Image (cartoon, rainbow, N blue to C red):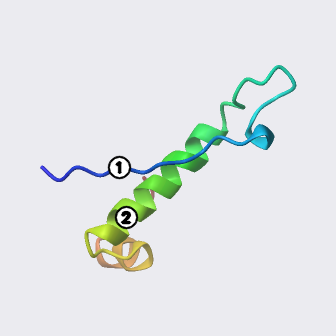
Amino acid sequence: MKIFKYNYTVMFSDCDNAQIVFYPNFFQWFDRATQNMFIQVGLPWNEVWIKYDIVGL
């Protein structure tokens, strides 16, 4: 199994006034990490969607 690691520094703008991470941001971070994972294993995101007829992840 390949191990993939994606680091992201949570910025102040990612949080609300109480300094709690705005939860919808987790979906953006997951999407970025997923795209980077596919690129690192040699499957560019735009080609994966077409080649494997992926509707969404």
23 relative to 4, above or below:
above
Relative to residue 46, is residue 2 drawn left or right? left
Q: Residue at x 82, y 19 (%)?
A: 18
26 relative to 47, above or below:
above
Marks 2 and 1: in contact by CB < 8 Å?
no
In the picture, the disc for residue 40 is none
Q: Secondary structure at mark 2?
A: loop
Q: Residue at x 80, y 42 (%)?
A: 13
Q: Quadrant of residue 50?
A: bottom left
Question: The disc labelled 1 sits on which kind of residue?
Answer: Lys
Towards the viewer: 30 or 14: 14
Towards the viewer: 44 or 40: 40
47 relative to 35, above or below:
below
Q: Quadrant of residue 42?
A: bottom left
Examine the rendering and report whether any part of residue 28 can be seen.
yes
x then y, percent, for residue 31: 51, 53
In the picture, the disc for residue 5 is 1
Towards the viewer: 49 or 9: 9
Q: Which residue is mark 2?
A: 54
Q: Secondary structure at mark 1?
A: loop
Q: CA distance from mark 1 to mark 2?
A: 23 Å
Other residues around mark 2 within 10 Å, as few (<14) / some (14–19) / many (≥20): few
Q: Nearer the viewer, mark 1 or mark 2?
A: 1
x then y, percent, for residue 47: 37, 80
Q: Quadrant of residue 52?
A: bottom left
Other residues around mark 1 within 10 Å, as few (<14) / some (14–19) / many (≥20): few
x then y, percent, for residue 29: 55, 47
Q: Residue at x 82, y 29 (%)?
A: 16
Q: Residue furthest right?
A: 17
